[in-house]
């Protein structure tokens, strides 16, 4: 089967284990993924499965032509390729559910796009300490000196104010707490990157 799954991030909540321990989890919606293409070594040079996820009201001609060619009446928003982890190859048009890939107790890596914070200063963006309050009040959150006379330029990679967030972030070794196939929900221990209703990728650790 495939190596991962796409889920939509929900809100964080708390659940209790059978021994009464309180655990913070992130609730995610795991809708079935539709197989739209099978990449093979002979034709494409590698082997993977292309899946469609999400939906939208109107698609362009390229996507509608692709869906009509494989006789699927869906309007997907995104496509993604995932590696095969077994010899079992799904059929084009079949649906893959979350409980066929993961089970409670599995360790996963979660990848998503971090929240955007706009243009931020060094205190918020990099965690700098504020400058002493003895000087001018408008310099408290300034970065201070950004270089010496030699080499006479700002060194590449210097921590400066700038755009904060909207980066691809991966959090490793999170545990799947539970999976509910009826409500299509999966609970993952801890927090995961991304904003509410954003899509994140779950990759099973080998």
Image (spheres, grey):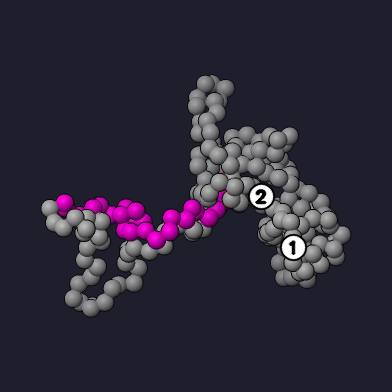
Q: Residue at x 50, y 27 (%)?
A: 22
Say if 73 sits above or below 173 in the image: below
Q: Residue at x 30, y 54 (%)?
A: 123
**Which of 38 and 69 lies nearest the eye of the viewer?**
69
The residues colored magenta run: 108-133
The percent position of residue 131, horizontal first and vertical second, equals 20, 54
- Label 1 element class: loop
Is tag 1's residue or tag 2's residue first in the polypeptide sequence?
A: 2
Q: Residues within 10 Å of mark 2 (few under 14, many from 20)?
A: many
Say if 178 sits above or below 112 in the image: above
The percent position of residue 183, horizontal first and vertical second, equals 70, 35
The percent position of residue 44, horizontal first and vertical second, equals 74, 70
- Label 2 element class: strand
Q: CA distance from mark 1 to mark 2?
A: 23 Å
The count of marks equals 2
In the picture, the disc for residue 5 is 2
Q: Is residue 120 magenta?
A: yes
- 64 vs 204, left or right, is right
**Which of 124 and 22 lies nearest the eye of the viewer?**
124
- Is any atom of residue 145 visible in this view? yes
Say if 190 sits above or below 70 in the image: above
């Amino acid at each position: 089967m495939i190596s991962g799954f796409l889920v939509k991030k929900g809100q964080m909540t708390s659940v209790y284990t059978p021994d009464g321990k309180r655990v913070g989890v992130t609730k995610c919606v795991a809708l079935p993924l539709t197989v739209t293409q099978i990449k093979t070594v002979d034709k494409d040079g590698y082997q993977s499965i292309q899946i469609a996820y999400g939906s939208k009201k109107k698609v362009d001609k390229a996507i509608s032509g692709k869906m009509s060619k494989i006789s699927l009446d869906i309007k997907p928003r995104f496509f993604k390729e995932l590696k095969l982890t077994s010899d079992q190859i799904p059929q084009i048009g079949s649906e893959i559910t979350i409980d066929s890939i993961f089970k409670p107790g599995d360790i996963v890596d979660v990848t998503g796009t971090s929240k955007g914070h706009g243009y931020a200063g060094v205190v918020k963006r990099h965690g700098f300490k504020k400058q002493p309050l003895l000087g001018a009040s408008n310099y408290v959150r300034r970065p201070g000196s950004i270089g010496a006379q030699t080499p006479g330029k700002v060194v590449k990679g210097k921590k400066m104010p700038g755009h904060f967030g909207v980066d691809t972030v991966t959090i490793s070794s999170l545990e799947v707490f539970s999976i509910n196939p009826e409500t299509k929900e999966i609970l993952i221990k801890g927090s995961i990157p991304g904003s509410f209703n954003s899509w994140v990728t779950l990759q099973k650790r080998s």
